[in-house]
Image: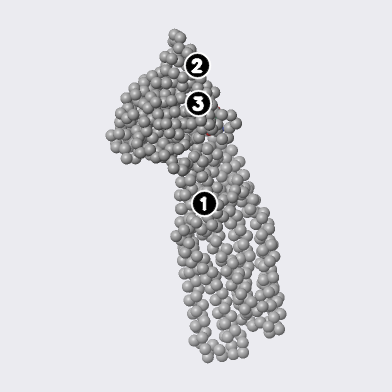
Amino acid sequence: MDKKRFPRNKIQWIWDNIEGLRGLLIVAMLGTVLYNAMQLTVPYFSQKIVDRFLTGDAAATAYESDKHGFYSLVNAMIGITLLRALIVYLDCMAYEHVSQRALYRIRNHLFAKIEHQDMHFYNEYRTGDLMTRLTGDLDAVRHNIAWVIRMIIECFALFTAVSIYFFSMNVKMALCILALAPVIFIIVFTFRRKVKPMHQLLREKHSQMNTAAQENISGNRVVKAFSREDYEIEKFDKINRDYRDTNKKTRLVWVKFFPFVETCANLLPVVLLWVGSTLLMKDEMTMGEFVAFSGLMWAIANPMRLLGNILNEFQRFSAAADKIMEIYYSEPAIVDPEDAIDHPERFEGKVEFQNVSFRYEDADLPVLSGISFVAEPGETVAIMGETGCGKTSLIQLIPRFYEPSSGKVLVDGMDVSKLKLKLLRTSIGMATQDVLLYSDTIDGNIAYGDTNITKENVIKVARVSAADEFISKMPEGYDTIVGERGVGLSGGQKQRISLARALAVRPSILILDDTTSAVDMETEKLIQEHLSELDFPCTKIIIAQRISTTKKADKILILQDGRISESGTHEELIKKNGYYAELVRLQTGEEVIA
Ligand code: DGT
Ligand code: MG
């Protein structure tokens, strides 16, 4: 996956994301060159002061005869130092501004990409991993713009400027000092090769750690129910230790290389002293030049020392950017077709399956085979069958969460794959099997699909869902805030809010996936009655296990091993004396007359 090819390389990708601030970044980069070049001025002035006022033939009288010249040099040194500090400050601000803007932009883009992905994507990626991309990985990108780029320019500018200055002063001395540079480059690039895979591994470990933490926080009820806290803590400790060890190993790669770089850097003053004194004795170099060389030795040594760190951070960025770009350039498979049908009027709600077969991408066997049925506008179609037989998979084909492997799903006679996705999905009200409520008020949760809905209508749909009664009894009624995933509500209460949410959009097609399974029989009966008296036309497709829910349906489909084994009304199916009749016998305890 890391070898994936993206339409843009990493630098182009960052460039794309700083649109509007490219000029500022270029100015900031020039600023970095400028403030580093200004570093040279202090040794330059020092050299002048030493040569004119401290050494040389006229040194003894130079100060008395040219006080003004002396103070001009000192003042210029102070002035340039202050100006440089100001430039450094503004420069850092500019990098920070650009990097934060890029971060903001990429994060929004990434979030939108994740939001628009298919079900398949959510099956493939773990939440913890996606969170890592949105947080830690993105921070590595920000750090790259704010620090790594600046440091690369700083090192390069400093090294080049000092080299030029050295050559302009004394070619022999400059050559002797810079002879060490190629050695450093060889060391650093060997290091880069070694550290690159380490950063990819480290990033994986980081993601694993986040995933473990996220899954445990979401699943803390299960952990508590089975008293598995100690086990989970131990498991997390192992992952955390693994992360720490990989982190340490990655850092230690540089530690192995660092002594060689450090030795080279420390050899510089020795070379200066050795070669410099020889040149001084031979009168091939002035004392001022020697002072300037000595004063600028750090400007050659520091980039050498920093290079490893910069490459380390760059590799961290590179590993993170690969992961982010994978999502950044990903495209969902289920999208609007070209010239998608926009349907200005409300759908009548006819749903038709024509010989539909379906297999999950990652599975070998099909879940559904040869499914054909029609739900006429306004009809109620119930789907029953044992657990795992494919009921949820079937209804997920209507809003095009997945595409059938063969056959067609039609709404109002139009293939769903030809319809505008947004239009199709906003015409469907769906209460999923796993209820997810947002940390918001009950009112906000019900109005999720239609934020313009009036308070009256929220109460109305809550009444239809038999939820109004328990909501009204809450101290803050509809303004009660429910926790993440609906904490604070019972399973049946959550189901009823989810039903109200599905009804609030006044859908043409209502799909209920086991939505009343946790609701008592009495309330369920009430809900069924309400659903048959909705004040808008609506086709209902209801998955249920209880006969009481499905009895009154216009059509009951029995799904067995991904095929419709029986279909008809309650009475017709009883006559067939098959699976359904058996179900009636089991649930009612009555002998039914075949
Ligand atoms: P239920 O809710 O327990 O009554 O069961 P159904 O009838 O809703 O079953 P369904 O459609 O969720 O699953 C049918 C089969 O497909 C079952 O063997 C599990 C499998 N399956 C469900 N979701 C996925 C998925 O996302 N990927 C793969 N590979 N298989 C899945
Ligand atoms: Mg299901």
Q: Does residue 517 appear left or right of residue 531 in this picture?
A: right
Residue of label 3: 371
Q: Position of residue 433 (x, y in %)?
A: 45, 30
Residue of label 1: 138
Task: Determine contact: label 1, label 3, CB under 8 Å.
Answer: no
Nearer-the-camera pick, 521 or 401: 401
Task: Determine contact: label 2, label 1, CB under 8 Å.
Answer: no
Dot 1 falls on a residue whose secondary structure is helix
Residue found at x 54% / y 50%: 325
The residue lying furthest to the left in this view is 456
Up-down relation of residue 219 to residue 72 (above or below): above
Residue of label 2: 579
Query: To which quarter of the image does residue 430 belong?
Result: top left
Q: Could you give the CA–CA distance between mark 2 and mark 1, rounded to whole angstroms?
A: 55 Å
Nearer-the-camera pick, 354 or 146: 354
Q: Does residue 556 appear left or right of residue 185 in this picture?
A: left
Residue found at x 63% / y 79%: 169
Residue found at x 40% / y 29%: 350
Dot placed on the residue nearer the N-terminal end, 2 or 1: 1
Q: Position of residue 296 (x, y in %)?
A: 60, 73
Query: The residue under label 1 is which amino acid type?
Result: Leu
Residue 495 visible (yes or no): no
Q: Could you give the CA–CA distance between mark 3 and mark 2, rounded to whole angstroms?
A: 18 Å
Dot 2 falls on a residue whose secondary structure is helix
Up-down relation of residue 509 to residue 32 (above or below): above
Judge depth for marks 2 and 1 and give the one in front. Answer: 2
Query: The residue under label 2 is which amino acid type?
Result: Tyr
